[in-house]
Amino acid sequence: MNFKKRLVSAALSATFVTGLLAGCSAGTSGSAQSLKIGVAFPVSGNLAKIGQACTNGVEIAKDIVEGHCK
């Protein structure tokens, strides 16, 4: 069961990274860009650990994209 949780977390993280990278554009150098993404993850109950792992994955993806777009 642990493998399934990791697989779901990795798949969601990869999806968000792809979406965030799509927001980067080389044609607008010098102007500030903002990309807002809303996510809904469980924060309580049996799925709280998965929700926290997914939230961490989104934060990591955000940091990667911010570094890539600068």
Image (cartoon, helix red, strand yellow):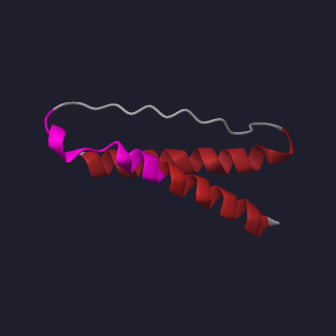
Residue 57 covered by magenta stretch: no
Quadrant of the frame with the N terminus: bottom right
Image quadrant of residue 3? bottom right
Residue 68: x percent and y percent?
29, 52
Q: Is residue 24 above or below residue 6?
A: above
Of residue 49 and residue 5, the one placed in the foreground of this image is 5
Q: If the image is split into quadrants, where does the C terminus sit? A: top left
Which corner quadrant of the image does residue 51 belong to? top right
Q: Looking at the image, which residue is at 46% across and 52% down? A: 17
Q: Is residue 25 magenta?
A: yes
Residue 10 horizontal side relative to residue 61, left or right: right
- Decide whether the magenta segment is chiefly helix, strand or loop: helix
Residue found at the far right of this picture? 46
Compared with residue 32, is residue 7 higher up or lower down, i.e. above or below? below
Q: Is residue 60 left or right of residue 10?
A: left
Q: Which residues are magenta?
A: 17-30
Residue name at image x 66 percent, y 35 percent = 40
Q: Where residue 54 appears, x then y in whole percent?
A: 63, 49
Residue 31, position as x, y percentages in the image: 18, 31
Q: Residue at x 85, y 40 (%)?
A: 45
